[in-house]
Image (tube, rainbow, N blue to C red):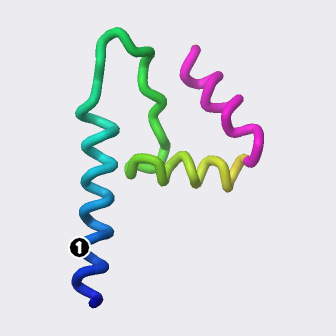
Amino acid sequence: MLYETAALVVACIVAAWCIEYLSDDPREPPRVKPTFPVPVIGHLFGWLWHGFEYPNIVGYETCT
């Protein structure tokens, strides 16, 4: 049971990475880079750390 759970977690991380980094389209705006290197989790940490100001912070960093 432990090995299956570990394999599922690894598969989810790999799938999230593939979705995040392999689906680039030049017509899209630039990607928002999380400070934590794992996709999605870095943004979750940002929400936990900064609260409701996080979207403003990320928007300011991305647009400048």
Give the magenta part as a residue range: 51-63
State the count of labels. Answer: 1
Give the residue drawn at x 25%, y 54%. 14
Q: Amino acid at mark 1?
A: Ala
Task: Give the residue at the far right of this rendering.
Answer: 52
Q: Is residue 14 magenta?
A: no
Q: For residue 20, what is the image quadrant?
A: top left
| Quadrant location of the N terminus in the rendered image | bottom left
Left or right, 12 with respect to 64, comes to: left
Main secondary structure of the magenta stretch:
helix
Q: Pointer 1: what residue?
A: 7
Q: Is residue 54 magenta?
A: yes
The one nearer the camera, 3 or 50, is 3
Left or right, 38 with respect to 62, comes to: left
Give the residue drawn at x 42%, y 26%. 31
Image position of 12 with respect to 29: above or below: below
The one nearer the camera, 41 or 50, is 41
Expressed as whole percent of the image width and height from the top left, the position of residue 29 reads 44, 15
Image position of 33 with respect to 25: above or below: below
Q: For residue 25, what is the image quadrant?
A: top left
Give the residue drawn at x 42%, y 19%. 30
